[in-house]
Amino acid sequence: MKAVMTSRFCWMVPALAAVIVGSGMNAIVAAPTEETKAPKAAKAPKPKSRTMEGTFSTANATMVKLKSKDGETNVNLVPTTEYWRIQTGLAANELKVGDMVKFTLKGTDDMATVQSLAPLTLKFADVATLTLDKIGRTKFDRVTQLMATDLVAGQDAKVASNLFPDGKLEAREVWVVVEPVKPVKKKAAEDTAQN
């Protein structure tokens, strides 16, 4: 009798499961055992920040080779890389309304847009506006946005990058550094014209 009940019960379990699935009812599934759980993925280590200055010996759409006092370093360009041209060491009287500038004032070196010249008013995105009546000897850097195709060998540059454990470098920001063009003094221009 016991064997008969066991055999009846065995054929009923698959039939009962088919009825539950067919009726749209939710079936309770047992939790997986330790042996069937997928192993947790290890967290990737965070990259370290690295900033380098030098000259491009090579530049193309996917990478730059930066030559510095430490040698040559390959840095990969990625879709999130930002490109900037920075004209350094400008006085306030060399700025125009609409220029984006970078300068250091009491520990800040954020970028702002020149809103007016007299007095000099700078707008930091949509966050704040700063008006400077007395600018003294403050030097400004004029900043303009570039594209990867604007990078060429021979340019002076600064690269802020992420250094990964495998040694790969990915650029966060690439700055092409340009010295300001100094106006030619009248006396020097006359001497040049006479020769």
Image: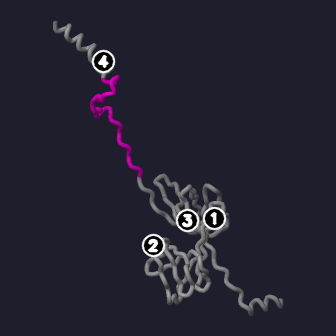
State the SS at label 1. Answer: strand
Mark 4 is on which residue type? Answer: Pro
Mark 2 is on which residue type? Answer: Val
In this rendered view, identify the residue nearer to me: 165 or 79. Answer: 79
Mark closer to the chain start, 2 or 4: 4
Q: Main secondary structure of the magenta part?
A: loop
Above or below for 64 versus 12? below
Above or below for 75 versus 123? above
The disc label shown at residue 14, or none: 4
The residue depicted at 52 percent of the width and 87 percent of the height is 135
Q: Residues within 10 Å of mark 4 (few under 14, many from 20)?
A: few
Residue 24 among those drawn in magenta: yes
Mark 3 is on which residue type? Answer: Val
Whole-angstrom CA distance, mark 2 to mark 1, is: 35 Å
The disc label shown at residue 159, or none: 3
Whole-angstrom CA distance, mark 4 to mark 3, is: 65 Å
Residue farthest along the left direction in this orientation? 1
Q: Nearer the viewer, mark 4 or mark 1?
A: 4
Mark 1 is on which residue type? Answer: Phe
Mark closer to the chain start, 2 or 3: 2
The residue carrying mark 2 is: 127
Whole-angstrom CA distance, mark 2 to mark 4, is: 66 Å
State the SS at label 2. Answer: loop
Q: Nearer the viewer, mark 2 or mark 3?
A: 2
Question: x, y percentage for residue 137?
Answer: 53, 88
Magenta region, residue range: 20-44
Residue farthest along the front direction in this orientation? 23
Mark closer to the chain start, 4 or 1: 4
Q: Are marks 2 and 3 in contact (CB under 8 Å)?
A: no
The disc label shown at residue 56, or none: 1
Q: Residues within 10 Å of mark 3 (few under 14, many from 20)?
A: many
Question: x, y percentage for residue 123?
Answer: 50, 76
